[in-house]
Structure formats: C-alpha cells, structure tokens
Image (tube, rainbow, N blue to C red):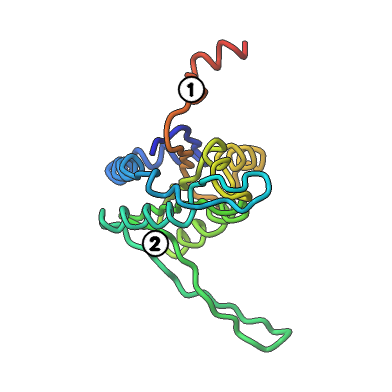
Amino acid sequence: MEIIAEFSFNKGKEFIEKNHKAELEQLRKVIKSVDASQCKTKVSKEKTMKGQMLYDPKAMNKCFKQLLKDDKWKVTRIIVKTFVPEISEEHKGFREIDAVKNKLGVEVQFGKYAFMVYNVSAKMTIFCKQGIIDSGIEVVPMLSLANEMSSGVSYFEQIKTDLEMRGISNIDIPVLVLGIDVIKRPKQNFSLKEFMKSHK
C-alpha cells in the first residue's frame, strides 16, 4: 500500500520525526508491505454496487495487525471504570489501542467516522494520560480507497477537514494522520507545487 497524504495534528509529524524516527520508519515499511490485493475478498450486497468485489476492512485490519505484531509492536489494553451514583453501580470496561512501541501509539482505522475522531480526540489522550504513549499515528483510507470498500467507511479527507475546523485543545496530544491507498492514482501524483500554482 501507499501513503498518499499526511496531516500533522498538534505538530504531530514534527514531534514524531524528532522523538520516534525509527518507529515512524518501521510503520512506513509496514504500510508499504501490505498486499491489499489479498484483501479484495468481499462481494458487495449493497444496491449501488451489488456483485462488485470490494476491499474487506476486517481483512485489511487483520493484515496490518499481524505485520505490526511481527515487528514487535504491542496491542495495549487498559481497564477503565467509573461510578454512577444515580444507579449506585460501578461501570467497568476496557480501552485498547492497536499498537504501541516506545510510547508511540498507532491506530489503523477502516471503520465508521466516529471511530476515527474518537481515536484522535479521546482514546489517544486517555492512553497519554496513563503514561503509555506520548503521541499517536492514525492510519486511515483515502476517499478513493473508501469508495472501494463497504459504505460507511470514513476517510482521510473527512477527518482532516474536521480536525482543522475543530482546532487544537490544551489536552490534545501530537498526532500524525496518514491517508493510504492501494496504489498512487493519477490525481494523487499531483504535487503540492502544482496545487499552489493552480490556487494563486
């Protein structure tokens, strides 16, 4: 797979390149080594693309997680609890992050939009507060890839828009959002230099 676009939230790219250069390079290699063709296994039942072969989000997630595990990244889980006085009960559960190495957290998200925002705005902050990570990377599909998956899968362009418009809070941690695709498509080869020229 290919990294097509990057968004540095709260100076995430700068922080990670300075403090986690080796881990970032490892993750880039993992992404490059994912063979997406092995994950194009889902036959669509949706009206708009019935019978089409789609990329299976679960298969892609599984592939990423195995490669990260092989590279000594660890799935990390914490127990969470809170007391609700109105019903006199303690609620217990857990939160889990896909991969952690040397205090860098990674989430690979091919799910619905709410999960992407939750990862960056809540989950990574919780893990940072627990001293498990100091920064994070969110790996998400580009719209072009999301269009070849089940409906409802969110994408890079969407989360970048909302994080830019939301702004940065004083509890946000540095996060690098990586937008990926199975190949570099013609439009994605359009350089930043060309973009700036066309928007003068």
Can you say whether 130 is above or below 150 in the image? below
Whether residue 26 appears in this view of the structure is yes
| Residue appearing at x 50%, y 52% in the figure | 42
From what the image shows, is residue 192 above or below residue 113?
above
Q: Is residue 63 above or below residue 159?
A: below
List x then y, in percent, for residue 27.
Answer: 33, 45
Residue 37 image-quadrant placement: top left
109 left or right of 199?
Answer: left
| Residue 98, placed above or below residue 80 | above
Image quarter where the C terminus lies is: top right
What residue sits 45% from the left and 32% below the top?
A: 4
Residue 194 position within the rendered picture, expressed as x and y whole percent measured from the top left: 51, 13
Residue bearing mark 1: 186
For mark 1, give the secondary structure: helix
Q: Nearer the viewer, residue 167 or 187?
A: 187
Disc number placed over residue 132 in the picture, else none = 2
Q: Residue at horizontal 31%, vertical 53%?
A: 67
In the rendered structure, which amino acid carries the disc numbered 1? Pro
Left or right: 162 in relation to 116: right
Q: Judge left or right: residue 159 versus residue 18.
A: right
Residue density around tag 2, few if under 14, some if 14–19, many if 20 or more, within 10 Å: some
Query: Is 149 in front, or is 171?
Result: 149
Find the distance from the CA under tag 1 to the CA under tag 2: 40 Å
Which of pointers 1 and 2 indicates the residue nearer the eye?
Answer: 1
**Helix, strand or loop at disc 2?**
loop
Mark yes or no: residue 19 visible: no
- Pick the quarter of the image with the N terminus: top left
Disc on the earlier residue, 1 or 2: 2
Which residue, as the protein is rendered here, is positioned at the far front?
51
Residue 28: image quadrant is top left
